[in-house]
Amino acid sequence: MNGQEQTLTWPLMHNNVDRADLDALVQYLQQDDPRLTHGPKVREFEELWAKWVGTKYSVMVNSGSSANELTMLALRHIFGAGDVIVPPLTWVSDIAAVIHAGLRPVFVDIDPVTLGMDIAQVTSRIGVDTRAVFLTHVLGLNAVTQDLITACRDSNTRLIEDVCESHGAVFEGRRCGSIGYASNFSFYYAHHLTTIEGGAICTDDEEFYDTVRMLRSHGMVRESENVDRRTAYAENFPDLNPDFIFAYASHNHRPTELNGVLGLAQLPRLDQHNEIRRRNFRLFMSLLDPQMYRTWFDTESSSNYAFILVLQEADFVLRVRVEQRLLSCGIEFRRGLSGGGNQLRQPYLRALLPEIRPEDFPNTEHVHNFGWYIGNYPDLGTDRVEELCNLLNSI
């Protein structure tokens, strides 16, 4: 190990909340009696976020996991129980949300090029009991295809997009999150836009939007923006105070005004930051040795807050060497890509679905064992990307 390698200190995320963001918070808090629970700032951010994504509606919540939870609960309330097709490569909250809503997860393997679901397997699993296809856009890559859109449309199946890791990825000129029936975003600290903790649900469907608004706040009818809906509940339950009618058994998933202030501070520079990340990812893919690593990921439609590193072939010896070199150089990484790899290997799913074998999903298994991600952030220069690739190629 040489001295140059020792200087490659590389966290998963760096400087994602800058001085201007903190100043915006301080300025807001210096008002006389600033409101802290969700209110006008959250609403302002919701409107601007929907416009940025390209949807009619947006509901801000306290995390991307809450966005997943409320989306699945709303689906269950509107369309009833049934199946939701999901990938094994995703964050735990996607699968947990399906389970918590009383829906049944149906697993299909991933496509090794997009890291999203294998569309042929999805179309083969859509049936009369399918309520939705819950697609994950992994680490900035777009996973939508026209075949998937057509299959969902022809079978009257809702396409739900998990865009928590892919703010700004596009499909045929449209931002991911504006293509399906609904979409979920996370504003966690390490993501493209951060409110520290936070998330959003986007949709063009008014009934779904209104249901999610109620579910966000204990299932309270007064959160509905539909006057006829509020009136109907008040008339059907005259023994209740109209301000305290709970249509659904839900929880409190509300954000704070401070989350809204941070979102408003970050949104104006999101496109610029995404372009830097996209530039870095293109360079990373172009410099990696294609004999050792998979370099086929789409660098034009993606928006990556992390570099995707996947071995071409299954090689546990090489895996050890890669991880030892990264560790010795102070480069933080996560093996398994999204959510730590194959969710079917996790204790909660082994207990719930013991009949499903993780080994039956070979593409997911490969990235589980031989894939990593490394941080890609806005103040990362091309010289450091080149240095990282030189290091990886020399292993």
Image: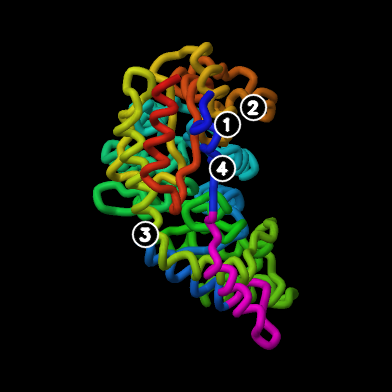
Can you identify the residue that label 1 sits on?
A: 340
Q: Residues within 10 Å of mark 3 (few under 14, many from 20)?
A: some
Q: Nearer the viewer, mark 2 or mark 1?
A: 1
Can you identify the residue that label 4 sits on?
A: 11
Q: Nearer the viewer, mark 4 or mark 3?
A: 4
Counting residues from the start of the chain, the first of labels 2 and 1 encountered is 1
Residue at image x 68%, y 88%?
A: 32
Q: Are marks 2 and 1 in contact (CB under 8 Å)?
A: yes
Counting residues from the start of the chain, the first of labels 4 and 2 encountered is 4
Residue 384 left/right relative to 174: right
Q: Nearer the viewer, residue 207 or 218?
A: 218
Can you identify the residue that label 2 sits on?
A: 346
Q: Nearer the viewer, mark 3 or mark 2?
A: 3
How much space separates mark 3 and mark 2, taking CA atoms? 36 Å
The reply to whether the magenta stretch includes residue 37 is yes
Q: Are marks 1 and 3 in contact (CB under 8 Å)?
A: no
State which region is magenta: 15-39
Task: Point out residue 185 in the picture as x, y percentages from the top left corner.
Answer: 49, 53
Q: Secondary structure at mark 4?
A: loop
Q: Residues within 10 Å of mark 2 (few under 14, many from 20)?
A: few
